[in-house]
Image (spheres, rainbow, N blue to C red):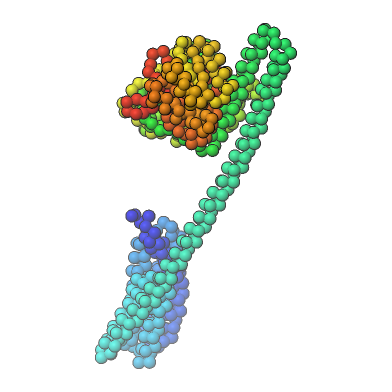
Amino acid sequence: MTAAQDPSADIAQEMLRERITLHSRALLWMPPIHAAMIVVMAFLSLSRVPARLFGCWAAAVLCVEAARAVYGRRTLQQVERIDPRRVHLRHIVAAAISGAVVGLACPLFMPYLEIAQRSLLVCILAAFPAVGVSVAMASRSVSGIYSLGVLVPTAAGWIGLYPHQAAVVVIAVLIYSSTVVLASAESERMLRRSVEIRRERDKMVLDLERSNAEVHAAVALAQREAQARSRVLASASHDLRQPLHALSAYSAVLTNDPAPETLHEVAAHVNQIVKSLGDLLHGLLDLSQLASGSYVPILQHFDLGDLMERILSEYRTAASDKGLVLKSDLEAIVVYGDALTIARITRNLLDNAIKYTEHGSVALSVRHVRGMATICIADTGSGIPVAEQARVFEEFYQVDNPARDRSRGVGLGLAIVQRLAQLIGGRVELHSQVGSGSRFEVLIPNASLAAPLLPSVRSGASAVPAGRKIYVIDDEVDIRLSMVQLLKSWQIEAHAAGDAAQARLLFDKAGRPDLLMVDLRLRDGENGARLARQLHARYGDFAVLIVTGETASPALQEARHTGWPVLSKPLHADQLRQAIDAALPASSPVFGKDAAGAIVLPATDATE
Ligand code: ADP
């Protein structure tokens, strides 16, 4: 442990500095005190001691004390910068010199004095070490050396004249010096305690300030969250009312005028409204799931470049429809993370890049820098003004859409992207210039450049494979009927079952399907994911899509861990089609697990 970490070394250092400060302050008083002592000595001895001798001694005493006072002042001026050990050592040496010069009075003057004056002189000199204890300010070394400095010449002067008293004098000097040192040790202990108390107080003040700051931050956060919640609620209720209002108007139109041409026109509008309502609901559900902390990332090793390649292929048509060039610069990077979450982030950003770019290109690249993977989505679109760049990550915030035109999105995408990125320990950075385009960078931890651990996964989604067989298991009769109808409209052979028993009957009668779409929560507590696993075990391999209205439950976590795509209701037809495309490409094995047991990813993000 270094001195900086060791608290007792810290205290010793602080004490030394404290002692030096106190001693330096006391030194400032030494010249006048010694001058007073010289006056007393002059009265005592000048009648007998030669004036020149006395003058030399007095001058020496004053010089030493003046030097000590000057050094003391300098020390006080730069007490934070001094080396305390060195300064303390100098104080010890100076104390020895000061004591010795004072003590020299005894051997120098004693021969000229009478016995009474000698005794008085010794008494005066013996008082000095006692005074020195308070001047030394809890430094045993300074007070000890000072008393020896005074007492040794004093004792030597006395013994020189009265050698038969040598033993008594030596013992007296030893006892006296030890007492002085003990007294100093006691004040050293007191100083230590007061330093400790001061440190405890400082720590308490610091802790108090810190917890105060934490409370303030928590209050500010709670206020911000409350404001954000009311903003979200206000925007959500507006964005829900508007399409519902339009829907009720269209349903009235259909009731009043069910002519085929009206039907066709209204159907297109209704489709758009339902899609935007679905987007809004999904966004809100995602946000609530992320806020509740129930979104649990599933960690696995996967090849990021490969995942990006597959996602990119989903956007080729959308980009070419708008005349945009879709560029990529991908490399094999192995990431230990939640592939589904990373896929959702990327799709959101690619969606936006294509949506907000009218000319030029959209480029997707991945890079590896010091253990982090960076997914970069750059476009040559409208760009985002600097003043708006932080706000676009807020819920419902859209640039330049005051009328809240729902065909331009609902303004939840980037808020979700940012939360998802935080959830996987990453972050999103935005660089954009109006007119030049935008670049979103997603930084993801736990990446390495090692060879991919997974076999290459499918790339690209094929068109809906007509003629394939899909079973729908759902306890809601409306959902069963609408799903079967929708699938049939795509030339897919579709059958439905309402529960596990009906499903087994269906499997027995019509064989296993290419794909099973199963509701997670079936009637009587049956679990769709578990049922799919049982059917798998009994009837062999087929692709599975789990569909659910749940946003947070143990059953949902369990379903996510199966590795099968989990789709959230309400599910728009396009999303369903995309998920089926991904689960049933023209020539590939069904969705499952690779040899290493890692999940082979679906081409479509389940929960979007
Ligand atoms: P939405 O796209 O549904 O409006 P988002 O949260 O995804 O909501 O985006 C918020 C806003 O940020 C958008 O309304 C848009 O103005 C702006 N934005 C996002 N991505 C881009 C981009 N690539 N280019 C220009 N503007 C963008």
Relative horizontal placement of residue 57, taking residue 400 as reference (left or right) = left
Question: How many marks overall?
Answer: 0
Q: Position of residue 113 (x, y in %)?
A: 35, 89
Looking at the rendering, which quadrant does residue 271 occupy?
Answer: top right
Residue ID at (38%, 73%): 185
Residue 220 in view here: yes
Looking at the rendering, which quadrant does residue 413 occupy?
Answer: top right
Q: Nearer the viewer, residue 33 or 374?
A: 374
Residue 606 in view here: no
Q: Position of residue 347 (x, y in %)?
A: 49, 23
Q: Nearer the viewer, residue 121 or 233?
A: 233
Residue ID at (41%, 13%): 586
Looking at the rendering, which quadrant does residue 173 occupy?
Answer: bottom left
Residue ID at (61%, 42%): 223
The vertical placement of 1 against 160, above or below, is above
Q: Nearer the viewer, residue 116 or 223?
A: 223
